[in-house]
Amino acid sequence: MKILSSAGHSKTLTPALLLSTLMLGFIISLYGQSEFLLQANDLWQILIAPDSQDIKQQVILLLRLPRSLVACLIGFNLGVAGLLMQGLTRNPLASPTLFAINSGAACLMALNSIGFAFFSALPSELATFLGALLGGVLVFSLGGGLRSDSNALRLILAGIAVNGLLSSLTRAALIIADDTAYSILHWLSGSLSEIDWHSWSQLWPLSLIALLLAFSTSRGLNLNALGEQTANSLGINITWLRVRVCLAVLLLTSISVTLAGPIVFVGLIAPHLARALFNNNHLVLLPASGLLGAALVCWADLLSRSIIPPAETPVGIITALIGTPFFIFLVLKGKL
Amino acid sequence: MSLRSPLLLAALLLLPLSFLSQHTHAATIEHDAGTLTLDKTPTRIVTLAFSFVDALAVAGVSPVGIADDGDKNRIIKSVRDLIGDWQSVGSRYQPSLEAIAALKPDLIIADSGRHHSIYQDLSLIAPTLMLQSRGITYRENLAVMQKISSAVDKSAQFKMRLKKHQKRMLDLKNQLNNSDTYQFAIVTDKGMWLHSPSSYAGSVIKELGLNSPMTKNINEPYLQTSFEQLLKTNPDWLLVGQYTENTVLDKWQKSPLWKMLSMAKSKQLIHVSASVWSLTSGMLAAEQIAQELASHLKK
Amino acid sequence: MTRYTQLLLSGFLLLFLLACLSLAMGAESLPIKTVLQTLIHGGDQDFIVNYYRLPRILIAILVGMGLAISGVLTQGIIRNPLASPDLMGISGGAGLAACTMLLIWPNIDNVWLPPIALLGGFSAALVIWLLNRWHNPSPARLALVGIAISAFLSSCINFLLILHPVEVNSAMIWLTGSLWGRNWDYVWPLLPWLIVLVPFSFYLAWSLDLFALGEDTADALGVDTKGLQIAALLSAVALASVSVAVCGTIGFVGLLAPHLARLLVGSRHKLVLPVAALVGALLVLSADTLARNLAPPLELPAGVLTAIIGAPYFLFLLHRYKGY
């Protein structure tokens, strides 16, 4: 990969490859694995001969298109969120999954949906936001992430413990509340099966705000990479930077969890691939990591529909199966 | 007097015999975990699935305990009316062995699909019949009902009722005769499950001579279904039972795609009771399903 | 009577009281008098007391001991306070193997569960050992690798359970660890393994004390360090695997029990091991008693409760640990 990025033509070749992978996944997921036996030709037909009475065209437009768009945007969000966290903490394992932000959001969302105590009064978006905040704050305060001598490993181990705690609470609450209880498996591993245009209209405005916020921090993150003191002396207000980054991360993660549940490890993998493929400028890394995340979720969703058709496997299990070996690889490579 | 006394004598002689035949019989029943021999007619029966309650009600026996998920209304009314009060022994997927043991049953009827792993424990409490309940067809269920009736020594009663049942079903079948397709589905806030012709409701529909819209996967009783698959299945009639108040159907109905379904065009979406159509199975349930179908079709 | 004997005795007493409580409480609460009568003479409550609660209590005690001793041995050999069979992926490997076997042959005899789980546990341990040899990571990083491997194995279990849906109770056993539906039929396959492995671990504990002084010192004192390390690791893996074979991946016990024991009696393995075994038994037994009594007749998986107790303690350990 190093050779690739140092070669002269890579400046155009790598982004082109990345975009075409994403586009290919996007297009295949528009017609793949369908009971209607959709084909690429049906996509073409929509463009040249739109027909509001043709069921195949309508399925693509009203079911497949929003699902693929949401998959990509959620992947983009998670990729960006992971990069922001790694940029701010300078911890290569920082990600929504390992810092219990995903599991915190899922836990409060579960409590919200089963009507536990006052949680049921909150709108589900607010509940997940609070859950994401809770998970993150717990990890940071208990892992000593706020102290100057904070240790990267300790933060990660704290994240794992908080993860264990929160997902156990989720399980306990669901078992007591839900007499079918089987939904736990789906609750704890994200799924995109119930996505429609309504989900998209919930997702994009908040994502847009959060992403703009994220991009506004890229210069700060570039300087932060040089060390806090350097950044400070170059006129960066570290506290203000932290607040903006945290807000962006929480928004990006919680809105994704609200719609699709915790899709794990995307926020860990995407930034590392982005760094391996591109330089260390956050202005480039942010979109790159986002696109990689989008491609990852898009392909994982496609895979999740193909394993036991016509039933679906939760997409979060697929990303977990891809993500954990990657995680082991990162730890062993001494990336920490 | 001279004529009467031999009769009286005979009656006196027969009395202990009839007493014997009422309280001791040796029923031997083949079930899913082996063969069970009962040397006494069971009187305290615990059932761990709703379909077995239907079978007992038909045989005229009241169970003392039912795994009713803690909600008596889960037993359908036509069954509830025929049996006396019972104790709850917890949920069907996790019946409480302690609560069952506390009832001191002399027969337990458990679901061989669900309670396979606790069969050993159940047989320690009382003689246990493992019979199929979930994902069973109409015909298979009748065979199970027969086994239960012979276990409680009510075979004769069962046969009489069966004849009546078969006549009713045949009458309704003749009334219903048409070529539309019918699909029953369960909806919750998590999704929709189509019940194929190898499920109970599906096989009752088939028994009534009505067509299923399904062409594939008919060996799986319950199929989780996305909106896209429902559009493909596209039944002429959709009968839905709800498990939760809000369901995915609310969302789907708002979609422009909904209008492309033939049952939406002809307004043939019918809400039915999930307890009758899905939670239980048995003669009484089947009759109710058939009657509901007939009443909707006449309109 | 030394303080240590007093401690052990009070531990036993506590365990006994808890066991009595667990025998009496549940969906059907029984007076202690009835319980004692039933234990001796059988009678009306024979099933509830002697066939339902008693084997479960025994399994909870055995499994708790197994996991705790396994934790002491792992931490002693790797000299890593963050190590334990569940965080090193050994429980995950054993769980995956046992779960896969039960999905392929649902009617297999319980006797086969421990050996199959052992195979899974050893494979996971082998992977960790190889990674450790090639990369020689720092203790905290090794813990992280272990956690990542457990995460991978548990997502494999999750995936298997999605592909072959089973009843939720059985699924919970393999996802979080539970004692639901465990009876005498599970005690017998478990018991012989523990009868052999527990005394062997006590024997190893004596040598481990020498090992704790450092490998060179131990060598000088005539301890076969390589052999000791291998023997202790093998029995740690075996203990964890047979425990997991019976009631799934009950988390955090193998981590928690040794630390609590060390807080009580210092760091000598000879002293730590019996106390840790007691603490482990107490932990699993109280988790299962709570699990049965929180919302009767519904049950929670015991593993959920050990995680709720264990995770905060793990955080506390992180707070005190200095050797990153």
Image (cartoon, coloured by chain):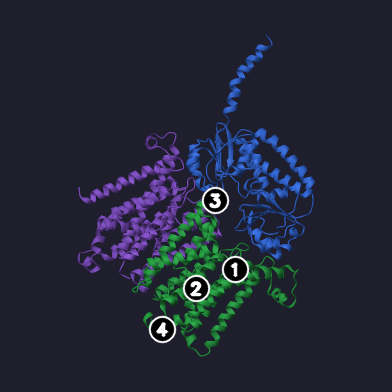
Chain colours: A green, B blue, C purple
> How many residues crowd mark 1 within 10 Å: few (<14), some (14–19), many (20+)?
some
Marks 3 and 4, how far apart at CA: 57 Å
Where residue B207 sits in the image (x, y, percent)? Answer: 72, 47
Residue under pointer 4: A235
Q: Are marks 1 and 2 on the same chain?
A: yes
Earlier along the polypeptide chain: callout 1 or callout 4? 1
Does the image show residue A292? no
Give the answer, above or below, for where A281 lies relative to A320: below
Residue under pointer 3: A179
Q: Are marks 1 and 4 on the same chain?
A: yes
Q: Which mark is residue A248?
A: 2
Q: Are marks 4 and 2 on the same chain?
A: yes
Earlier along the polypeptide chain: callout 3 or callout 4? 3
Does the image show residue A242? yes
| Parent chain of label 1 | A
Marks 1 and 4, how far apart at CA: 37 Å
Q: Image quarter for residue B24? A: top right
| Parent chain of label 2 | A
Three-letter amino acid code of the residue under disc 2: Ala
> How many residues crowd mark 4 within 10 Å: few (<14), some (14–19), many (20+)?
few
Three-letter amino acid code of the residue under disc 3: Asp
Residue furthest to the top:
B2
Element under label 3?
A: loop
Where residue C207 sits in the image (x, y, percent)? Answer: 25, 60
Of the pair C18 and B141, the residue shown nearer to us? C18
Three-letter amino acid code of the residue under disc 4: Gly
Where residue B277 sits in the image (x, y, percent)? Answer: 66, 48
Please name the residue shown 76% across and 60% down the image. B265
Element under label 4?
A: loop
Q: Image quarter for residue A35? A: bottom right
